[in-house]
Amino acid sequence: MKSLITMLLAAASLTYAQAPGPIALRGARVVTVSGPVLEKGTVLLRNGLIEAVGENLDLPKDAWVVDAQGVTVYPGLIDALSTVGLPETPAQPATPRTETPATPRGGQDLPVPLEQGPQFRPFTTTWVRAADLLNPADRHIEETRSAGFSSVVTFPSTGIFAGEGAFLNLSGEKQGRMVVASPAGQYVTLSAHGFGTYPGSLMGVIAYIRQVSFDADHYKLEMQAYASHPAGQKRPNYDRAVEGLLESPRLLLPADNAKQLDRMIRFAAELKRPAVLYGGHEAYKIADRVAKSGVPLLVNLKWPEKSKDADPDQEDSFRTLELRDRAPSSPAALEKAGARFAFYSGGTAAKDVRKALKRAVDAGLTEAAAVRALTLSAAEIYGVADRVGSIEPGKIANLLVVKGSLFDEKAKIQYVFIDGVKYEPVPETPPGDREGRSAPGGVQ
């Protein structure tokens, strides 16, 4: 019987290749997430899918049987909000045409937009699809995969309505093979892009989002009415901004502190659209409210901390100190309240995600809930739990193989299987080479 190390090293040449014949990982501790943990389990992979899972499986004669004792097999981790795989320089949103500059407060000339009617849609690129922008050669794919992630949900991140995300498998091979589901949702920010033009304030941005949503509903009714009785009717104008919004299955709305969480829960109900909140650092204050709303929350694993460039003599406020101390307890509060939540890296270096996850566990989150929030819960929120997120027959063979436990600081990630193909971790990228990469998930 081959050892796990010998077998998988021999399979190194399979990287960026078609999945091999059936492989059976036998004798591993298998964390299925959707069911019980199997202390001496076997996972059978074939043609990029999980064919069978159990403790006493009858294996096919052509299976490559691997002695997996001493390792733990998890579902591949999922980063629920990311920019991995997208170009380093995001596409710039369309800007309004301008005329003679006006002079606002401070004496600085700013352009005055010509369009001020109902079709004026600044900082909006709802139609931009992450799936169309993918760069399989993006080095962040390999870095993220090496940290145990098999999948990310990646979004354009520039503008108020930034564009449509995609649920990706991190194979880094062909663009079409990476896409598991698209569109995954519409990424929305509350960024006020300067004063002097609309929308130039938080109130203006919220009003703008509300208006575009109302316009989309009206546009849909117009199109339906015209399609059912086109004869003798004036044809509605095509509007790609609302078309992009209408085809998005959910809105991602920013909400980090307690006030923002309450505001966005009410705003989502007003818009009458499926919504997902992201941020959640002060969810410990409002976990019951989040749970009662039924709105899922993506919790940012980049916990608040003092900036390295901060003045060492500056005294932080009590509220700032409280947030730094209590933010990692938000997932535990959400678990206790019964809220739906998942995790995203939020700009945390991929290699540090496990450390951030451990802080949440140390603050009261159960290990089972922590694993679920990085796997099945993320898949459920994006509507792909029938394909990924747990170790079940018929699902995509996305697996994480760890020597030890995911929560043990000394545990080592051995391999990641994506679509049944094995990938080995790569050496860590020097910190200086990671600078300049933006990540979504900032809230105002």
Image: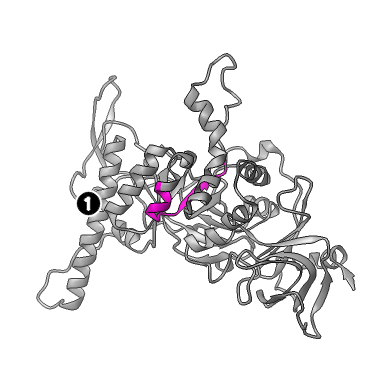
Q: Which residue is drawn at 54% across and 44% down?
A: 346
223 relative position to 93: left or right: left
Residue 387 appears in the figure? yes
Residue at the top extreme?
Answer: 313
> Which quadrant of the figure has residue 301?
top right
Q: From this viewpoint, which residue is outermost toward the front?
A: 336
Left or right of 59 in this view: 149:
left
Q: Can residue 199 be seen in this view?
A: no
Please, what is the three-letter code of the amino acid marked with disc 1? Answer: Gln
Residue at position x 55%, y 31% from top?
324
Q: Quadrant of residue 27?
A: bottom right
Q: Quadrant of the N terminus?
A: bottom right
47 to the left or right of 314:
right
Q: Could you say where residue 83 lies in the image, as x and y percent from the top left? A: 53, 50
Along the line of sight, the residue nearer the viewer: 341 or 333: 333
Question: The magenta stretch spans which residues?
Answer: 289-302
Question: What residue is pinned by disc 1?
Answer: 119
- The quarter of the picture where the C terminus appears is top left
- Residue at image position (78%, 55%) is 404
Decide which of 162, 186 is in the foreground and name it.
186
Question: Which residue extends farthest bottom?
Answer: 61
